[in-house]
């Protein structure tokens, strides 16, 4: 499925002689909520960064591709599967492709909406200090993402404020802690700056 997204991204890039193109750098904060089938739950905030390329079919509709790094979450808690306090660390990133639309409000300001598919990958580490063991695993998948925001364009420059949301399920396999099913949400608020071509 990632190969399909990459092919679509290359198609967008190769047919980008459309209404307008935006190239943006995003930085903000991500709130990650991770819950496991055994009742474990964790909320964590970290810095999120990303890049986004948008190509308009019209002045108010088009396609986009982006990369998002949602930062890391960390937690220390008693893990009943291991029988001791463990140090858990996870990080998630995604390659996204979707569509966007904008509603002009005047004076270069527009409301924006986005929807698409996110090819995500998350890495997780569980370290058990007393056992002197650590477990590392990763999971990946494809799930929808959503976003809303407001943007300001003037003199070939763009500034935008965005909120995006990604939810996915992951299954990890561990010889240390046993198999585990996780649900995760990534809620990201960011500001972006960029150029309009």
Image (spheres, rainbow, N blue to C red):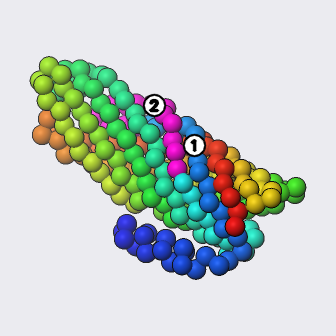
Find residue 27 and name its label: 1
Q: Which residue is mark 2?
A: 44
Q: Residues within 10 Å of mark 2 (few under 14, many from 20)?
A: some
Name the one closer to the observer, 61 or 153: 153
Nearest the viewer among 72 and 26 is 26
Q: Main secondary structure of the magenta part?
A: strand
Give, as a single range, the part of the protein colored magenta. Answer: 34-50
Q: Quadrant of residue 83?
A: top left
Q: Give percent across and percent down for residue 111.
A: 75, 55
Residue at image position (64%, 44%) is 191
* Circle count: 2
Quadrant (top left/top right/bottom left/bottom right) for the C terminus: bottom right
Image quadrant assignment for residue 80: top left
Which residue is nearer to you in this view: 10 or 135?
10
**Observer able to see residue 63:** yes
Is 89 in front, or is 182? 89
How far across and how far down the image is residue 123, in percent? Answer: 31, 44
């Amino acid at each position: 499925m990632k190969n399909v997204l990459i092919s679509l991204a290359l198609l967008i890039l190769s047919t980008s002689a459309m209404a307008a193109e935006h190239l943006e750098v995003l930085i903000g904060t991500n709130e990650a909520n991770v819950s496991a089938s055994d009742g474990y739950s964790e909320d964590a905030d970290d810095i999120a960064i990303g890049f986004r390329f948008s190509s308009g079919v019209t002045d108010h509709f088009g396609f986009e591709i982006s990369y998002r790094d949602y930062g890391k979450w960390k937690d220390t808690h008693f893990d009943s599967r291991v029988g001791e306090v463990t140090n858990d660390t996870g990080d998630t990133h995604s390659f996204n492709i979707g569509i966007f639309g904008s509603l002009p409000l005047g004076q270069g300001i527009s409301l924006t909406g986005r929807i698409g598919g996110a090819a995500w990958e998350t890495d997780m580490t569980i370290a058990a200090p007393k056992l002197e063991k650590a477990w590392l695993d990763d999971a990946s998948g494809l799930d929808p993402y959503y976003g809303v925001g407001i943007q300001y364009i003037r003199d070939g420059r763009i500034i935008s404020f965005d909120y995006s949301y990604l939810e996915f399920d992951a299954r990890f396999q561990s010889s240390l802690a046993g198999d585990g099913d996780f649900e995760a949400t990534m809620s990201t608020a960011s500001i972006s700056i960029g150029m309009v071509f």
